[in-house]
Image (cartoon, rainbow, N blue to C red):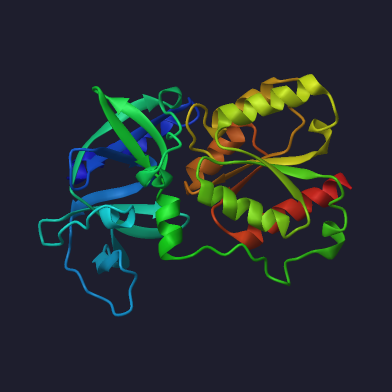
Amino acid sequence: MTGVLASVDQRTKLVGENRLELLMFRLSGKQLFAINVFKVQEVLQLPNLTEMPHRHYCVVGVTSIRGKTVPVINLSQAIGMPALPVNEASTVIVTEYNGSVQAFLVGGVERIVNLNWEEISPPPVTAGRTHYLTAITRFRDQIVEVIDVEKVLSEITPFNTDVSSDVLDEEAISKSGDWFVFAVDDSPVALSQLTGTIKRLGLQTKTASNGQRAYDMLQDWIAKDDGTLERCLMVITDAEMPEMDGYRLTTEIRKSEKLRHLHVVMHTSLSGNFNRAMTQKVGCDGFLSKFQPDELAKVVQARLKECS
């Protein structure tokens, strides 16, 4: 099963081209689910499992993978579906999000598909498990549901938006005035984390759920010419989003004579030096790994001081 990911490192060239690759898998039924390949470290059969007392009900235990203790999460149960059986034949997808490693128990891995972000749509606003999705797409006439892993993880380990008292800079915060931060992310949970911390710094926020909607809002502010654009302290954008990713959004901002002055920071759970290099390539002013309230506060406060 590890062979399906053997060439992941070669796939990084897709980032920045508004493209992505999804690892597709099933849980307990015929429905196809997916997560971004760049979040995946490996796919393997479940190693020996150790049950832990007082664990979250979706965490079936912990296992050792390459010398690291990793929690194993029953993904089907975590998104409100029947729990998958756990045995030595179980398949797990080992992932890294926001600097933490976890394994998701799945029914079986299907394949990797190469797509354009324009082929990825926001999930419909309906009841059911759609609140655990960030996007949907189609593959061979089947609907593929892209899971909001950040929401799953936040329910197992609740997030914190507080900023340490020794990080808060009252001088910077006093300069917040009419500035606002434009936050762009397709995950409602990630957007809530981001705006929660920013509001603790005394700043207003405006939000968009993907790069295309953010770009449309920016164009609308240009057309209205009512001073909104001039009050935008900075744009903080996720990398992976339906319709237009954060790299393409930044590229479009830098192409525009009326937008290129905007201060853009990439805020992503994709880690590693490659992503830092990509943010520089497309013209971002900074890079932040999710979710670190203190680091976010430092970046925003530094920008406030620059603009005062």
- Tell me the residue at 83%/23% (across/down): 225
Residue 84, x across and y down, in percent? 19, 56
Q: Residue furthest front?
A: 127
Position of the N terminus by quadrant: top left
Q: Is residue 278 above or below residue 88?
A: above
**Residue 76 appears at what percent x and percent y?**
26, 53
x and y, in percent, of residue 249 in the image: 60, 29
Q: Tell me where residue 21 sits by quadrant.
A: top left
Q: Is residue 186 left or right of residue 169?
A: left
Residue 104, can we see it? no
Question: Considering depth in this image, is 114 or 12 the residue closer to the camera?
Answer: 114
User: Dividing the picture into quarters, in which one does residue 67 lie?
Assistant: bottom left
Out of 13 and 49, give the one closest to the viewer.
Answer: 49
Q: Is residue 137 visible?
A: yes
Quick check: 214 above or below 104?
above
In the orientation shown, which residue stands out farthest toward the bottom?
53
Q: Is residue 54 left or right of residue 43?
A: right
Image side of residue 239 versus residue 14, left or right? right
Could you say which is closer to the camera, residue 156 or residue 95? 156
Residue at (55, 56) in percent of width and height: 291
Q: Quadrant of residue 260?
A: top right
Look at 77% across and 19% down and name the residue there: 223
Side of 248 relative to 43 (left or right): right
For the image, the number of numbered tags is 0
Whether 272 is drawn above or below 277: the answer is: below
Q: Position of residue 15 (x, y in %)?
A: 46, 32
